[in-house]
Amino acid sequence: MTAEHETPAGEPEAQDEIVVGLLTDPDLPAALADHLGAVLPDELGERCGTGRTWRVEVVQDPFESMYPDYRNLVDKARHHVHGTRWDISVCITDLPTRRGSDVVVATIDEQDRVAVVSLPSLGGVFLRRKLRALVVSIVEHLAARGHDGSAATAAMRAALSSNAGRLVRPAPDDTTVDVVRQGRLATPRLVAGMVRANRPWQMVLGLSTALAGAMTGVAFGVLYSSIWALATSLSIPRLVAITVGAISAMAVWLVAGHHLWDDGNGSMGTRPPEVRLRNASTVTTVVAGTTIFFLALFAIAVMTVFVVVPPSYLAENVGSASPRSYLTIALMATVLGTIAGAVGSGLEDDTTVRRATYGYREHERRQRAEHETDNHTTPIRQFRRD
């Protein structure tokens, strides 16, 4: 379709309207896509010059329909958006994708103007800025090919490459291009992105039974003077050791008690590298969540100790009422609370704990793929720059 506006000479000038569709997984990808939908029309209008108008449509539709074969993700994405009126389609998923030892940030079909972006490949920080730069470059690249029928300019390809690594074409006559990251930091960055998508702090907030047990342990540590004497007599290395030990104990308890470790059995042909990747993200997520849990308890314990224990009474029992004494007692109380919380976490529902892991997400994908219906529809949110 076209839109018209008046030129300085008073003659109408036709404008091409380009519709960009963003198809996203739920949760974090959907939230980031909504932001993109609001800012892309203006940014594309500035980057690509006059003569075009841009409309962005955002659709949330889980990529479970693409399970279990992730190697042909672009083919399935192309089929997923078939029948839409989109000129350019960008699919944003929280699935990690790799080609051998390379991390695939995006795969672009230049002929059909469809791209799939793997959100975890962008790492765990500054996701909004990174995703925005990458998607703008992809759309600019695909729009240039479709506008004049030739390859994108070298400047566009350089901009796309600088945003996310380098461009790799699987075969000389292939219409798809992979945007890949290589090197020793590529896989750790991918794991960090998977952990960020898991949002470990949400797992901690759901551990109500563990929190109840932890608060009981903190109260015990704050109120008993024998624990004060023990805490203030410990050296810094010992305090560090028991802190690390408490966090590790709770993390191991969560992983083992709720069967979070994926041994690869029954994974429908999942390759061992993918299993190792999920396990690495699961363990990192649990450790990060447990650390957040510990820090939150410590903040509560510090406030409680300062409020409940008078300086004169503390000095009478341990010989000093310095800030260090208060902090040391709070730390010991937190260690006790964390251990009590680990025991309490064994009573949590498995789903509550496993929801933040990629193993559980894969299980959800299998279930949704089995129950997916042909008449499933999703709402479209439209953003437009005139």
Image (cartoon, rainbow, N blue to C red):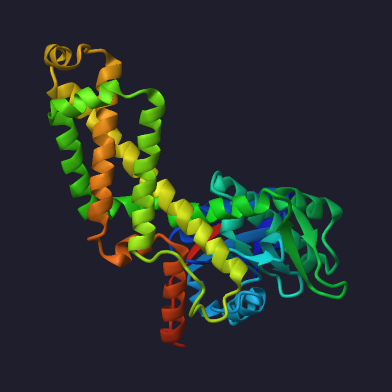
**Residue 93 in sight in this render:** no
Of residues 158 and 381, the one drawn nearer to the viewer in this rendering: 158
Residue 22 as seen in the image, left or right of residue 203:
right
Report how many numbered discs are placed on residues in the image.
Answer: 0
Q: Splitting the image into 4 quarters, where does residue 321 fall? A: top left
Q: Position of residue 363 (x, y in %)?
A: 43, 74
Residue 261 as seen in the image, left or right of residue 344:
right
Q: Position of residue 273 (x, y in %)?
A: 61, 67
Q: Residue furthest right?
A: 172
Residue 233 lies, with reference to residue 136, above or below; the image says above
Residue 292 lies, with reference to residue 15, above or below; the image says above
Residue 314 as seen in the image, left or right of residue 284:
left
Of residues 116 and 288, the one drawn nearer to the viewer in this rendering: 288
Question: At x 60% / y 62%, what residue is drawn?
Answer: 118
Q: Position of residue 349 (x, y in %)?
A: 26, 65
Of residues 161 and 146, the one drawn nearer to the viewer in this rendering: 161
Question: At x 26% / y 18%, what residue is drawn?
Answer: 325
Question: At x 13% / y 12%, what residue is drawn?
Answer: 316
**Residue 353 in sight in this render:** yes
Residue 371 lies, with reference to residue 353, above or below; the image says below
Q: Position of residue 219 (x, y in %)?
A: 15, 36
Residue 17 lies, with reference to residue 47, above or below; the image says below
Question: At x 13% / y 11%, what residue is drawn?
Answer: 312
Image quadrant for the C terminus?
A: bottom right
Image quadrant for the N terminus?
A: bottom right
Of residues 175 and 343, the one drawn nearer to the viewer in this rendering: 343
Q: Which residue lies furthest to the bottom in this view?
A: 374
